[in-house]
Image: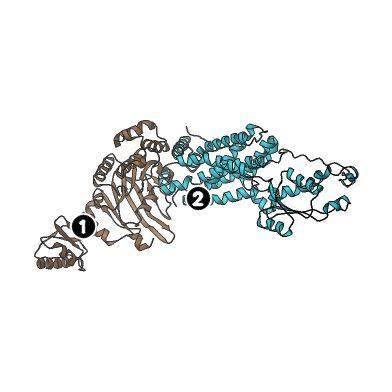
Amino acid sequence: MNGELVIDVRGLTKTFGALKAVDHVDLAVPKGAIYGFLGPNGSGKTTTIRMVCGLLKPNAGEGRVLGFDVVRESARIKERVGYMTQRFSLYEDLSIQENLEFIARLYELDDVDGRVARALDDLGLAARAKSLAGRLSGGWKQRLALAACMIHEPALLLLDEPTAGVDPKARRDFWDQIRRFADEGVTTLVSTHYMDEAVQCDFIAYIAYGKKLLDAPTAEIPKKVGLKAWKMSGPGLARAAEALEASDDVAFTARFGGDLHVVGADAAALARVVQAEAQRIGAHAEPIEAGLEEAFIGLMAQAQDNAVRNGA
Amino acid sequence: MKLPAIKGFSLRRLGAIFFKEFVQMRRDRLTFAMMVAVPVMQLFLFGYAINNDPRHMAAAVEIREDGVFTRSFLAGLKNSTYFDIVAVTTNEEDGERMLRSGRAAFLIVVPEGFERRLVRGERPQVLVAADASDPVAAGGAVNAVAQIAQRALARDLEGPLSRLGPAPAPFDVIVHRRYNPAGITAYNIVPGLLGVILTMTLVMITSIALTRESERGTLEALLATPARPVEVMIGKTTPYILVGAVQVALVVALAMALFRIPFYGSVVLFAGAVTLFIFTNLMLGYLISTLARTQMQAMQMTFFVFLPSILLSGFMFPFRAMPGWAQAIGEALPLTHFLRIVRELMLKGADAADIAGDVWPLALILAVLAALALLRYRRTLD
């Protein structure tokens, strides 16, 4: 393996006709890390993940995944990667048990029955093993899908928006599970556009229009984004928010409980407009450290749906 | 349990796909019912409804004068079972109208002075006008008319009139209608139907094999596993061999029980030919599923197989009557060869050497289809 890097690819590029879905993306993911892939819809997250696990052939780029060549050795990579697709991709007309058995046999695992039984126990689905996968609720489907892509104990887990449409409790449970895998040394690359998922990651890469714009340990993200923030509290914040949003010096405002966070790039200009507005409505205003939340909202606000702008 | 011969090929993975496909097939009750119901329905429709030697055709008779010979001739027509005389008229207009309107398929005109001129040996003419807008419908009856006339009057032409009877030909022609002496259409249709049924159901079922997976999103996960194209291809198609076998057993059993279709040939050869044909159809369907993007597209593509298969294979219309280019297309269709094999085996009691000429083209088609399907299978989502 290439040092400690499980994914080490450079210049990955994929075009679909005239559309450059992924444009020279580099990824360096250390072993055991949870690597978050952020970006608006259509920004190229799914395409990148598919290239990493060999489902798509890159037009350009090179590198290694789990020590295997990403272009030429995709068959070897597939054996050691667990890929959870965005859409539920198990067979709805097979039972839970049959689905797990099928996947286990495809990976030519030993002791299929034992593994499936253990997976069912871990899931807490042993009692419902014979019911059809299509009858499960969204949260259960997602847990089953995770169990299915972990059944061959992969070294690398690729999760494409794994918790879209899943309730917050199930989402938290899911992330606890991912964290446990990470502690066991499983590397995870996960795409998301939920902030509460982003904060779970060790690293965050931000991608928009197929280009990686940002890549850093999660703790450093706010500094990299470089936003300044003020917190306002008091009455009449709703109208203040409207007024502030109209200002060129304010990037965006966001409610955090009773408070209003006002975020901008230029510290001096931001201070001026916020203080003026606070004085006008009689609210309290103080500068705060821009956190991950502000950085995240800032990033997402910058680039709206990429698919819309690309016309794809 | 790895086969060392093919690199990376795994019998376990193949088995996993086979088993999964089998379970899904069993669970899809509607499709399963269709696979049994369609053959039975087609067998009944084609077997009972289609007859290329139609009898009891409506005939109108226009008679200017009645007489003993005329009556004998008409009785002869009726007794031949080809004609049912639905109207007798003396009016020229009426007869023409009946033929034009379709109320009668034949118009038989006995001219004035028929009896008298017959006795005088003037060889009067009787006109039989047939509605030949459907040549098949008119054909059998038209061919039979001359003989009917001869036989019907033979009894009346006795004594001094016997000189008017037919002079025997200087030699005898003996015709044997071999393999189907009674000319029963079902003997021709039903064995052929076996091929049609297998083509329709198997090509249709397998044509959605991959498109269904990609539409449901399961193909992405399947492609992300180590499964090889050849394993997917064999694993996804072989469960349907069983379906084909059930259909064959059903159709052959019904054909023999209901239509008394004979079976003179070797059952072993028959089973071998059927297996080869089933494989060919499965490959054809699978190839379509690698070409189509959606299930809908796949279904539409199957019609490009069905139409020539039914029209150009010799199932519906005589193969030898088609122009060269149509025969060339026909030769490229698996059904054409299978039809010949089945008819030769069931009706003619053919042996291996007799059917070899149609077995190797079928095997060749199978090999080409399998190779194309493997080339077309996308191991990536590109």
Percent of width and height locating residue A164: 30, 49
Q: Which mark is residue A145?
A: none
Residue at figure coordinates x 68%, y 37% from the top left: B347
The answer to whether residue A222 is above or below residue B238 is below
Question: Which three-letter amino acid code belongs to the residue tagged 2?
Answer: Ala
Report whether residue A176 is seen: yes
Residue at figure coordinates x 88%, y 53% from the top left: B122
Tally the numbered discs: 2
Residue marked by disc 2: B298
Query: Looking at the image, is mark 1 or mark 2 nearer the viewer?
Result: 2
Identify the chain drawn in brown.
A
Q: CA distance from mark 1 to mark 2?
A: 49 Å
Q: Circle 2 — which element? A: helix
Report whether residue B280 is seen: no
Residue at figure coordinates x 71%, y 45% from the top left: B82
The chain that hosts pointer 1 is A
The chain that hosts pointer 2 is B
> Badge 2 local density, few (<14 within 10 Å), some, or many (20+)?
many
Residue marked by disc 1: A294
Percent of width and height locating residue B344: 68, 38
Residue A59 versus residue A298: which sits nearer the camera? A298
Percent of width and height locating residue B377: 49, 47
Q: Circle 1 — which element? A: helix
Residue A247 appears in which quarter of the rendering? bottom left
Question: Which three-letter amino acid code belongs to the residue tagged 1?
Answer: Glu
Q: Colour of chain B?
A: cyan
- Residue farthest toward the front in the current orientation of the protein: B66
> Badge 1 local density, few (<14 within 10 Å), some, or many (20+)?
many
Query: In the displayed structure, does residue A138 sit left or right of residue B246?
Result: left
